[in-house]
Amino acid sequence: METPHIAVIGAGLAGLACAQRLRAAGLAVTLFDKGRRPGGRLATRRLVWPTGEALLDHGAQYFTARTPAFLALCGRLLEVGALRPWSGRVLDQRAPDPGRAETRYLGHPGMNDLARYLAQDLTVHCEAEVSALERRSTGWVLHFKAQASREGFAAVAVALPAEQTAGLLTDIAPALAASAAAALTAPCWAGLFAFAPEAAWPDWQGLRPAAGAALGWLARARDGAALVVHASPEWSRAHLEDPPAVVEAALLAELSHYCPGLGPPLAASVHRWRYALVEQAAGTPCEFDPALGLGVCGDWRLGPRVEWAWTAGDALGQQLSAAFSHPH
Ligand SMILES: Cc1cc2nc3c(=O)[nH]c(=O)nc-3n(C[C@H](O)[C@H](O)[C@H](O)COP(=O)(O)OP(=O)(O)OC[C@H]3O[C@@H](n4cnc5c(N)ncnc54)[C@H](O)[C@@H]3O)c2cc1C
């Protein structure tokens, strides 16, 4: 009997975790992602200016590990050098969380390299935006925004943010679409700024502004004279459709309150995350409809953390493997 072929839509951490499980179970798996590389919100950009350059993570900043399965993965990733512990000084202007003194992890050399490492043995098609799914008697067909359709998939795992999941599934899987539609993801405007190395740099690596501030997070680049700032969910929502140049100026003005000695930036850019941080989660790691051969995962199942994205993807991978490894 032919090995069942499973399509995973979305090659962020959830999709990668799902695909790794499927591959380990001996199933054929292909990932499709609309981005230029795998990783989704595990995103790194190189900021280049005449006198230097810096790697900046403009999505997830650092992450922690609490469950045994994710701790085990982090252990393996530390061993191969795809991950580093981070002990940067964080100035927390909110009520600090007294409970936890956890190890913080960073992808190495950038957050995206973690995804690159996990994707290396998988088949990933990038710049492949899925626009619709169709179920035929011969299996699932994937339709793309800008390329020929692909058919013959025994099952599909959807590993997208909640809002995009709901959009894709409304017509073909109303129950799964409804659970995605009940989840909510806040946007985030991110600003990336390079300054002169000899400027008056702050003595922290990360700063979490007080609640109610326009900025939600500021962090220095690991390897260069640059900073990334994240606007708060409230500010990002209010300015979601503002032109990038307007947002850049506003984020820079906010940044100067915290770092008055940096002077004018040498390079700057902004990135809009329309779906950044889960505000309302589904509450279970994944959902799988065996009759349809369709499942959903992603951070929106559990909450706004890298670990929960991986946990959700891994859980869906396990369910799909159990359903397809021993065809009846
Ligand atoms: C600004 C920001 C800061 C964050 N900070 C932290 C932090 O400090 N700590 C932490 O633990 N977490 C943080 N997070 C959250 C963390 O990044 C996410 O929870 C996690 O990366 C989500 O992974 P995912 O696989 O569920 O989704 P994603 O990474 O969003 O993956 C979804 C993928 O689907 C693709 N896609 C979308 N639509 C389509 C389509 N139609 N067809 C094909 N592909 C499609 C996208 O390109 C993307 O690659 C942060 C996120 C952001 C944005």
Image (cartoon, rainbow, N blue to C red):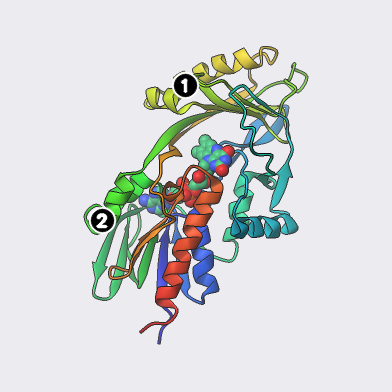
Q: Earlier in the sequence, mark 2 or mark 1?
A: 2
Residue 106 drawn at (x, y percent): 66, 44
How would you rate the neighbour count of disc 2 (Cα within 10 Å): few for under 14, some for 14-19, many for 20 or more? Answer: some
Q: Is residue 43 above or below residue 175?
A: above
Secondary structure beneath disc 1?
Answer: helix
The quarter of the displayed image where residue 295 is located: bottom left
State how many labels appear: 2
- Residue at image location 73% in from the left, 20% down from the top: 201
Please state which of the two labelled residues, at mark 2 or mark 1, is closer to the viewer. 2
Whether residue 36 is visible to the viewer of this picture, yes or no, is no
Is residue 291 toward the left or the right of residue 296 in the image?
left
- Disc 1 within 8 angstroms of ligand 1 (CB): no
Q: Is residue 240 above or below residue 127?
A: above
Q: Residue furthest front?
A: 99
The residue at which mark 2 appears reads as 175
Q: Nearer the viewer, residue 121 or 46?
A: 121
Q: Nearer the viewer, residue 17 or 264?
A: 17
- Residue at image location 31% in from the left, 50% down from the top: 179
Per the rendering, the mark at residue 247 is 1
Q: Residue furthest left?
A: 171
Is residue 76 toward the left or the right of residue 322 in the image?
right
If the image is split into quadrants, where does the N terminus sit? bottom left
Residue 120 drawn at (x, y percent): 60, 62
- Residue at image location 69% in from the left, 60% down from the top: 76
Per the rendering, the mark at residue 220 is none
Is residue 238 toward the left or the right of residue 14 in the image?
left
Q: Residue furthest bottom?
A: 1
If the image is split into quadrants, where does the C terminus sit? bottom left
Hey, what amino acid is under mark 2? Answer: Ala
Marks 2 and 1, how far apart at CA: 38 Å
